[in-house]
Amino acid sequence: MAKVKVTLIHSVAHRQPTQRKTVQALGLGKIGSSNILPDNAATRGQIFKVAHLVSIEEVK
């Protein structure tokens, strides 16, 4: 199964509470933190919600 590396590039300060919780659910805390997640519909949906705060790259 494919995986994606999600990295937090912008702060979640002064963002909506749902966006803060989504970033936390992705396993991201501070700016620059990364997490490798499975590439499925649930993960893609979460990433879509906070796409302006994270960067995404595929991992093989």
Image (cartoon, rainbow, N blue to C red):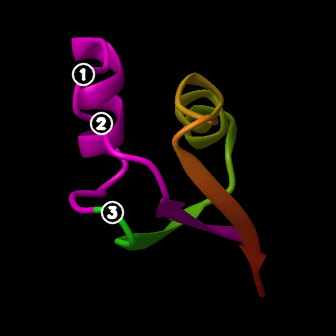
The amino acid sitting under disc 3 is Ile
Q: List the residue tagged with mark 1.
A: 14
| Position in image of residue 52 (x %, y %) | 61, 35
Q: Disc 3 versus disc 2: distance between alpha carbons?
A: 9 Å
Q: List the residue tagged with mark 2.
A: 12
Question: Upstream in the sequence, badge 3 or badge 2?
Answer: 2
Q: Residues within 10 Å of mark 3 (few under 14, many from 20)?
A: some
In the image, residue 19 lies in the stretch drawn in magenta: yes
The amino acid sitting under disc 2 is Val
| Position in image of residue 36 (x %, y %) | 50, 73
**Most foreground residue, 32 or 2:** 32
Q: Disc 1 versus disc 2: distance between alpha carbons?
A: 6 Å
Position of residue 13 relative to residue 36, above or below, is: above
In the image, residue 29 lies in the stretch drawn in magenta: yes
**Residue 5 falls in image quadrant:** bottom right
Q: Residues within 10 Å of mark 1 (few under 14, many from 20)?
A: few
**Secondary structure state at the residue bearing disc 2:** loop
| Quadrant of the image containing the N terminus | bottom right
Position of residue 57 relative to residue 56, above or below, is: below
